[in-house]
Image (cartoon, grey):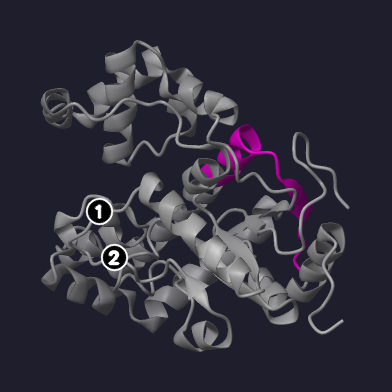
Amino acid sequence: MVEVPGVNQSADRLEPILIAGPTAVGKSDVAMRLAAEFNGEIITVDSMQVYKGLDIGTAKPSIADRERVPHHLVDIRNLSQEFDAAQFVEEAIKAVREISQRGRLPILCGGTGLYFNAYLYGLGTAPKADPTLRAQLEAMPLEDLLTELEQGDPVAYQSIDRNNRRRVVRAVEVLRLTGQPLSARQADWQQNPAASHAPARFFALSRSVEDLRRRIDVRVDEMFRRGLVEETRQLLSQGFSTNRTAMQALGYRQVMEFLQGIRSLPETVESVKIRTRQFAKRQMTWFRRQAEPRWIRMESGTSAESVATLIARDAGLTPQGT
């Protein structure tokens, strides 16, 4: 069994398995294989798949996949609702408990590093939002916010999505309220006494830069072929643009700009590919700095079945019925 520092290895066979990694690396296929072979259910660790209607652009599991294997934390919020790490932890703990009580294997799978850390190590001690300060920061130009963040918290500046205004505002807000960088508080999460859910079976998948780039390009092309433009148009009619969290979902903002005539369709497709590659790079940085998973390198010809077999062996799993 793989040794993960600081984690008890004498886990029950129904202790959750966690599968993380960047977008398009192949996490979902591996999780599906594991769930089918070992009587499992999947808990989606994705900040955007929780929203109804964000289907194509978030690579949400298909209806057929959800019929084959139960998925949790998918389509649990309307676009009018906000969703955050605290809500995720509450929902995830509940799902793990219910799945285990049914004698099935919980599998947490996704790419939202913040949610993995919140589940594993607690929510940290970052202060609550200050409405007055928040309003002041939201009125500032993004360039000014980034300058302040770079000077006060260079670690967060390097890892944060600099186009995600909401996260930049929050990082600067924490810096001003506490005088301490957000990155330092995140680094302290592992010391949080609420960290009671850390499993021995935490895996992260990776690929070469070239292989991941190819897979991202194929995925983005497929999203547009399946109707990402029309999906975005429908979402806008349902109030999508008023949800600051959902608006950060990759692809949708770029398609909105296409619908506004800001760029051509080919330029939009390329823009989504570039943003997705950048996002994948930030995801890898997050998991390497903030987590302690067992890394599994996938090659272009590596099958989901072989990776699932490796994870099962290292986790000490036995197929159902044996």
In the figure, residue 34 lies in which quadrant? bottom right
Q: Earlier in the sequence, mark 1 or mark 2?
A: 2
Side (left or right) of 144 relative to 273:
left
Work out whether residue 138 or residue 263 is closer to the camera in this orientation and state it. 138
Position of residue 199 relative to residue 136, above or below, is below
Residue 257 in sight here: yes
Q: Quadrant of the C terminus?
A: bottom right
Residue 24 in the image: state x and y as whole percent.
57, 63
Magenta stretch contains residue 277: no
The stretch in magenta equals 282-302
Q: State yes or no: discs 1 and 2 in contact (Cβ < 8 Å).
A: yes
Secondary structure of the residue carrying tag 1 is loop
Q: Within 10 Å of the Cα at label 1, are there few (<14), some (14-19), or many (20+) other Cα atoms?
A: some
Along the line of sight, which residue is nearer the eye, 305 or 194?
194
The residue that label 2 is drawn on is 77
Badge 1 amino acid = Glu
Looking at the rendered structure, which numbered label has been put on residue 82?
1
Which residue appears farthest toward the front when viewing the image? Answer: 101
